[in-house]
Amino acid sequence: MSKLSAEEKFIDLSDYGRPLALRIACAFSKTAVTPVHVTLLFGISGLIASLLIIREYYVTAGLFLILKSILDAADGELARLKKTPSYTGRYLDSVFDIILNFIILGTIFNVTGQPAWMFVTAFAGVQLQGTLYNYYYVILRHKAAGGDRTSRVFEKEVPQALPGESQKSVTALYIAYKFFYSIFDQVIYIIDKSASTSNTLPKWFMTLLSVYGLGFQLLLIALFLSIGLIEWILPFFIWYSSGILFFILLRRVLNRNQ
């Protein structure tokens, strides 16, 4: 089930796991398994990948990173199939993502023995890339008729819990989300304040930008691991971040010409 209407749907290169994610969600849709359970599974998958990197089982680690990406999509699919959207799931998903990114890149840093500044810069770059993609994507979903609105363009206040979830859980996870993400959200917003009031972006632009989605980032890491180039991962993501300004400038040019 797409988060966008048919008219706004684009080819999302970071969402390659969606077909398998939907199959997993369908298999769990008539069971007691909840979207949060699936979120916990993708967290475990990410931790297993990190452990395998430490043990230098790089190809298997890459497979678990891709599994993590598939399960990351499956929890949302299951929530939509069961018609149980929740802010608990939305924030828990994001909190797990950033913690796992830190652990995975930190594990690579530990194994390769590269400088600490390289790890910190690569981690910040990965988060800014993902933040830019999510920023534009959430804006698009809010502008689209029938688009998913569980994620908000601006997380300024604790949302009211939806039916079936605890307000205490929503509040606690919202605070955790703000703690981890606020600096990255603020940086992207400061650089591109006008994006939220811009016209809808063309599908080809969103497809191009989707190379900054978390699923595609994990796919790249898995690729580097599988071909024995683990020492390239941190430098690559530092270089990869240079495209952030390119995408922002392109977005402004496109909206100016509409």
Image: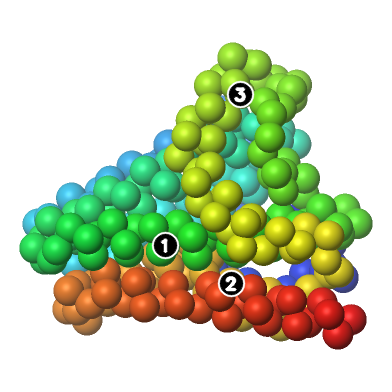
How many C-alpha atoms fall within 10 Å of the one at disc 1: few (<14), some, or many (≥20)? Answer: many
Q: Nearer the viewer, mark 2 or mark 1?
A: 1
In percent of the image, x 23 and y 65: which residue is there? 118
Give the residue at mark 1: 126
What element does badge 1 sit on? helix
Give the residue at mark 2: 210
In percent of the image, x 78 and y 73: which residue is there? 201
| Residue type at numbered disc 2 | Ser
Quarter of the view holding residue 81: top right
For this rendering, which residue is in front, 85 or 78? 85
Q: CA distance from mark 2 to mark 1?
A: 13 Å
Can you say which quadrant of the picture contains the N terminus?
bottom right
On screen, 177 above or below 184?
above
Give the residue at mark 3: 170
What element does badge 2 sit on? helix
Confirm whether residue 63 shows in the render. Answer: no
For this rendering, which residue is in front, 99 or 38? 99
Residue 20 screen position, x and y as percent: 54, 61
* First in residue order: circle 1 vs circle 3: 1
